[in-house]
Image (cartoon, coloured by chain):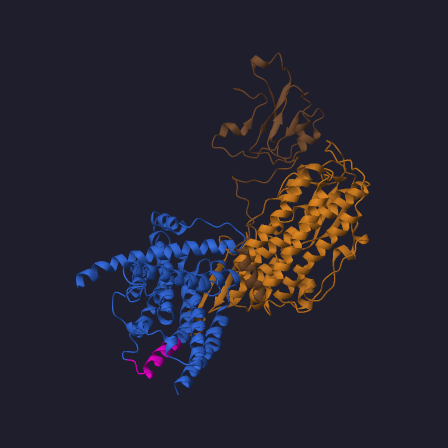
């Protein structure tokens, strides 16, 4: 009798899977009763390319070119972590202007990543206009990347160990300021659309308490939306961040709406940082870093962490004195966001909330699977 | 005379399809321009239908084949049947009344529900359930509005209050006083609000939500069946627009002769374009999708109360 | 709410954001990493480009008989299918013999045109 009652006719399984128009390159198996999700099981691994092994066969400059394919939605951030790890091992002195250029490119990449997030979130909620506007405005930043690094999406290791690969062209500063005006225009439009589109679907949905967030390992905007004021750029500063003046937005509610608002606020702070960097940039000419063969990395091991758009990322590199690293372990923020946090949040919600929760966590399948 | 009527039926059907596809193309261009894009050419829906017709028709193993293939045909046929009772700027082909139209409007939605259940996939099952719940919610304000107009005609003592002929010949604005005028405006707005749910556009396109349930009801359909469902959706926009025009704005231009008929036709198309723009294009660009609980709340509490208030104003006017 | 309505209706009359390629196009800046241009007369056959390439897309080959007296050493053959257009070969070349141009129209139906030989015209 008990077994027959367990075979509930309204209980079925839906695959929010890899061949689904509303998800990325990963899959979540949902067990549903009626319209309520009972349990969720994440299924990662569709995008595994073996980066950690690939990096053991290439020297530092070639690894720099490889590192922007770790997560293509924010390539320059991953370039920076890798360059910092090698710089710590070689103890090389980086010129001041190179540090400023690095921070400029990283913040531009963060703006671009948040625009992709806004477009994908709108698409998940059915708000078609937001998707089209976000990807339209992202194109201005891609044109900037083309001017400075030579490629729209793949900057090919622009931030490399020892500095940057090319100097800024002369027309870059004027164009960057114009693009920042357009970004502020885009933020203004987002605020216009907010009450009718994002607010009713995300208010009170997918609430993550602070205790759960710390226990499950959330970082970045997710834990800032649950009440903890932490940012690697303040706690453990790198490059020239100690000299810059920016705020860290924090909210207490922990639901999907708070996460959306925090990312919007971070976009505004990034525009602020770009303007400050442009004002303080030293004017001398920079000698670009040229690739050389047989450049040995001294022995040692180091762990470097950075704040990328999705959370806290890190690289552990161990070298035994040759030009290729002995072991390079990559810590991506999305692995912990995907498996413990997503499964915890999806339990007990409705089917219509699944895209809202998933996109508000901003998971990148690429740096989860590496 | 009856053989002329029988010959005109396929003509009106084809005319309805062509007008519907043309309006769908214009709707796509206007939506694109509102989003700062360029948009496809106006004949894009025709090219889409041509492409879908020549593709392979896949029937899944888990489905019930005779229901699976029958539902698209029934959906398109019933939508064209409603078109025969409505005026196109000149007199309608068949004589009907409002209650018949109210019942006929349910059939295409029911066909979609049965199609979803017979598909044999989980996504279509979820979509069909949502369509059933949505159908139950928006029928209520629709019924209240249509019955209110019929009540107005009854209490003014006009003969045959439910027939379409009466509704067309006596525009309802001229019969009432001030508070009845306000009541009619409220009812018009409620009917305009029901329009996106009937046509399944955002914010009410839950049954076919492609980002949540991978296509919903139409997940397993492809090829010719999908083309027939697409045509049915497109013709329904023309049908619902014609209903609103017949109830609230049946004015002609009153120019005698052949030019009069052509001018009436053009005027009808202009009115239809304005209605489709407000009820389908604009709201699709400006809003996001609602959840099923929010849809039920919107129709069963808010819309019903507003339309009952409109009915109350009409009742006050008559007394 | 009213702001949304006003803005959407205003967009109907403004110029769209799209750049209608190929009728219009955005100007490509200098320094764009496109197709390779190789000048064989400047090359000294050091082989550095082949060693630095992360994907092993450059292979040093010997010339066929009729070119052997003018070009006796080995010269790079570039496989555009494997190339990731990173520009390390351009940076490392000591004589500026290998450059990256602005051409990115590289899609083709012909598999033979994917491999770029050191000398342009027919080599077998």
Location of residue B207 with respect to A335 vertically, above or below: below
Give me the residue at 49% from left, 73% from top. Answer: B298
Tell whether A62 sits left or right of C1. Answer: right
Report the number of discs: 0
Location of residue C61 with respect to A40 vertically, above or below: above
Magenta region includes residue B146: yes
Tell whether A279 sits left or right of A42. Answer: right
Magenta region includes residue A220: no
**Residue closer to the observer: B168 or A54:** B168
**Residue closer to the observer: A291 or B246:** B246
Measured as percent of width and height from the top left, residue A24 is found at 55, 53
Location of residue B163 with respect to B257 vertically, above or below: below
Give the residue at the far front of this rendering. Answer: B256
Give me the residue at 41% from left, 84% from top. Answer: B317
Tell whether C78 sits left or right of B235. Answer: right
Which chain is displayed in blue in the rendered image?
A: B
**Residue closer to the observer: A272 or B151:** B151
Residue B61 visible from this viewpoint: no
Choose top left, top right, bottom left or bottom right for residue A345. bottom right
Measured as percent of width and height from the top left, residue A258 is found at 65, 65
Measured as percent of width and height from the top left, residue A103 is found at 74, 48
Tell whether B130 sits left or right of A128. Answer: left
Give the residue at the far bottom of this rendering. Answer: B319
Which stretch is magenta?
B143-158
Which chain is displayed in orange in the rendered image?
A: A
Which chain is displayed in brown in the rendered image?
A: C
**Residue closer to the observer: B198 or A83:** B198
Choose top left, top right, bottom left or bottom right for residue B67. bottom left
Choose top left, top right, bottom left or bottom right for residue A155. top right
In the rendered image, the quadrant that contains the N terminus of chain A is bottom left
């Amino acid at each position: 009798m008990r077994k027959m009652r367990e075979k509930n006719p309204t209980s079925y399984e839906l695959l929010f899977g890899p061949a689904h128009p509303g998800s990325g390159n990963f899959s979540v198996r949902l067990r549903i009763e009626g319209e309520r999700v009972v349990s969720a099981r994440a299924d990662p691994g569709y995008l595994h390319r073996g980066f950690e092994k690939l990096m053991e066969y290439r020297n530092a400059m070639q690894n720099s070119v490889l590192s922007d394919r770790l997560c293509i939605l924010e390539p320059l951030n991953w370039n920076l972590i890798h360059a910092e790890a090698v710089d710590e091992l070689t103890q090389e002195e980086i010129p001041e202007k190179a540090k400023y250029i690095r921070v400029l490119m990283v913040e531009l990449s963060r703006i671009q990543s948040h625009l992709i997030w806004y477009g994908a979130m709108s698409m998940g909620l059915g708000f078609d206009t937001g998707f089209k506007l976000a990807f339209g405005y992202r194109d201005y930043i891609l044109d900037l990347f083309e001017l400075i690094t030579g490629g729209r999406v793949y900057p090919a290791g622009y931030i490399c160990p020892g500095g940057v690969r090319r100097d800024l062209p002369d027309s870059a500063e004027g164009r960057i300021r114009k693009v920042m005006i357009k970004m502020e225009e885009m933020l203004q439009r987002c605020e216009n659309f907010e009450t009718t589109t994002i607010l009713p679907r995300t208010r009170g949905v997918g609430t993550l308490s602070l205790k759960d967030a710390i226990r499950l390992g959330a970082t970045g905007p997710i834990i800032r939306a649950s009440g903890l004021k932490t940012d690697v750029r303040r706690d453990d500063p790198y490059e020239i961040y100690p000299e810059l003046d920016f705020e860290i937005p924090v909210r207490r509610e922990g639901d999907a709406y708070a996460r959306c608002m925090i990312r919007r606020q971070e976009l505004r702070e990034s525009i602020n940082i770009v303007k400050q960097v442009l004002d303080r940039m030293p004017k001398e000419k920079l000698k670009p870093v040229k690739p050389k063969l047989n450049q040995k990395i001294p022995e040692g091991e180091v762990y470097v962490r950075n704040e990328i758009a999705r959370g806290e990322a890190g690289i552990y590199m161990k070298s035994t004195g040759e030009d290729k690293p002995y072991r390079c372990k990559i810590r991506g923020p999305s692995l912990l966001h995907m498996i413990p946090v997503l499964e915890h949040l999806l339990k007990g919600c409705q089917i219509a909330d699944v895209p809202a929760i998933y996109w508000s966590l901003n998971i990148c399948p690429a740096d989860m699977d590496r | 005379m009856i053989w002329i009527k029988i010959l005109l039926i396929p003509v009106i059907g084809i005319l309805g399809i062509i007008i519907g596809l043309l309006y769908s193309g214009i709707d796509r261009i206007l939506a694109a321009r509102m989003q700062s894009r360029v948009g496809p050419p106006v004949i894009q829906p025709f090219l889409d239908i041509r492409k879908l017709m020549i593709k392979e028709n896949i029937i899944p193993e888990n489905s019930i084949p005779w229901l699976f293939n029958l539902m698209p045909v029934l959906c398109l046929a019933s939508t064209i049947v409603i078109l025969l009772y409505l005026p196109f700027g000149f007199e309608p082909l068949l004589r009907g009344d409002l209650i018949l139209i109210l019942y006929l409007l349910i059939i295409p939605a029911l066909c979609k529900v049965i199609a979803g259940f017979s598909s044999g996939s989980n996504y279509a099952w979820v979509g069909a359930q949502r369509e059933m719940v949505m159908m139950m919610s928006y029928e209520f304000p629709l019924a209240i509005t249509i019955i209110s107009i019929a009540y107005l005609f009854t209490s003014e003592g006009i003969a045959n209050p439910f027939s379409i002929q009466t509704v067309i010949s006596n525009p309802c604005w001229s019969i009432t006083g001030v508070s009845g005028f306000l009541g009619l405006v409220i009812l018009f707005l409620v009917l305009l609000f029901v329009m996106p749910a009937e046509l399944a556009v955002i914010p009410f396109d839950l049954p076919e939500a492609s980002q949540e349930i991978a296509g919903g009801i139409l997940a397993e359909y492809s090829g010719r069946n999908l083309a027939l469902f697409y045509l049915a959706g497109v013709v329904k926009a023309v049908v619902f627009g014609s209903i609103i025009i017949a109830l609230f704005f049946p004015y002609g231009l009153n120019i005698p002769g052949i030019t009069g008929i052509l001018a009436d036709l053009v005027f009808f198309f202009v009115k239809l374009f304005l209605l489709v723009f407000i009820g389908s294009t604009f709201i699709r660009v400006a809003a996001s999708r609602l959840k099923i609980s929010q849809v039920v709340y919107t129709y069963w509490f808010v819309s019903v109360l507003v339309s009952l208030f409109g009915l109350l104003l009409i009742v006050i006017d008559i007394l | 709410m009213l702001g949304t309505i006003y803005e959407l209706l205003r967009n109907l009359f403004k110029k769209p954001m799209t750049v209608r390629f190929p009728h219009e196009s955005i100007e490509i800046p200098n320094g764009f990493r496109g197709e390779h241009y190789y000048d064989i007369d400047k090359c000294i056959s050091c082989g550095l480009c082949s060693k630095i390439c992360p994907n092993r897309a450059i292979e040093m080959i010997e010339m066929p008989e009729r070119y052997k007296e003018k070009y006796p050493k080995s010269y790079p053959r570039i496989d555009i299918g494997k190339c990731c257009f990173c520009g390390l070969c351009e940076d490392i070349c000591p004589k500026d013999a290998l450059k990256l141009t602005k051409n990115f129209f590289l899609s083709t139906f012909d598999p033979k045109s994917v491999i770029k030989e050191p000398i342009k015209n027919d080599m077998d």
